[in-house]
Image: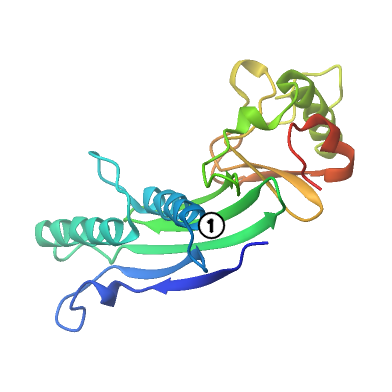
Amino acid sequence: MLTFEKQPIAIQDFFDCKNTDCVLTEILLLRFINETDITKKINHEIEQATSSTLHIDEGEPIETIEEAIKSFNISYQKIKQEFPEEIVPYEASIHCDLSFQNQDILSISIDSYIFTGGAHGNENFKFINLDPETGKVIDSNSLFKDHGKFVSFAEAIFRKTYNIPEDQSINSTGFFFDNDKFTLPASIGFTDTDVVLFYNSYEISSYADGPVELRLNKKDASELFSIQIL
């Protein structure tokens, strides 16, 4: 098993915040230690996924957390110059964690809250799944032996969990799946006991209703996966 540590990243590492207003940050980046070529790739993928969460401007993708923090703070400084009496500090809270690992997969969770003004901030939760042999991201579709069979399996449990009768629309109780058809979320990950399907706000529910999480028992679902998940 790979060994990891949480590395706090502070805005003060990159800006003089004693003499200038800065964004408010609380960032814990997950890094695997005992560097090898593989763990370097893993660390890069985690840092890139974390940086994309913080990247709010259009343009070229940002690869490092340092670039992302600098871009985030510069965006705030520009807005503050335009509206000095109205703007409140931007905020970024990002926590990375190791959700599960075995010989076939590393499942990393990234929990974030980004505030750039307005009525509320943007909360987001996502998993990235990595191949511990190559350090590369595993595409969600390649996780399954038969994608359609897994969707049917997950839909049956979703309906049972949220009390949606089989003979009624998947949206009959207030969800809004596109085209009235059950689909998997953008974020799929793993814990020691569960397969986690995590729908962020606006995927199938309103912001007021919040995110929707479905947990599937790994023992029940394991035969549907193309990799070992137990």
Number of callouts in the render? 1
Q: Nearer the viewer, residue 81 or 152?
A: 152
Kindly indicate the quadrant of the structure image that contains residue 12.
bottom left
Please name the amino acid that badge 1 sits on. Answer: Asp
Residue sitting nearer the eye, 229 or 193: 229
Residue 59: quadrant of the picture: top left
Residue 161 or residue 33, whichever sits in front: 33
Left or right of residue 52, residue 217 in this image: right
Q: Write down the residue under mark 1.
A: 111
Q: Farthest residue in the front direction?
A: 36
Q: Looking at the picture, how far across and down is residue 76, in whole percent?
A: 21, 59
Q: Quadrant of the N terminus?
A: bottom right
Residue 110 is left or right of residue 225, and the answer is: left
Residue occupying the far right of the picture: 220
Q: Secondary structure at mark 1?
A: strand
Q: Residues within 10 Å of mark 1 (few under 14, many from 20)?
A: some
Residue at image x 23%, y 56%?
Answer: 71
Q: Is residue 167 above or below residue 202?
A: above
Q: Is residue 129 left or right of residue 73?
A: right
Q: Residue 45, image x and y in percent?
A: 45, 49
Q: Residue 35: horizontal and vertical position, in percent?
A: 48, 64
212 up-or-down from 118: above or below: above
Please state the horizontal and vertical placement of residue 211, each as a whole percent of the image: 61, 46
Q: Residue at x 66, y 47 (%)?
A: 105
Residue at 14% across, 82% down:
19
Q: How is the image coloured?
A: rainbow
> Which residue is most to the left?
81
Work out whether residue 124 or residue 59 is closer to the camera in this orientation and state it.
59
Q: Is residue 94 above or below residue 126?
A: below
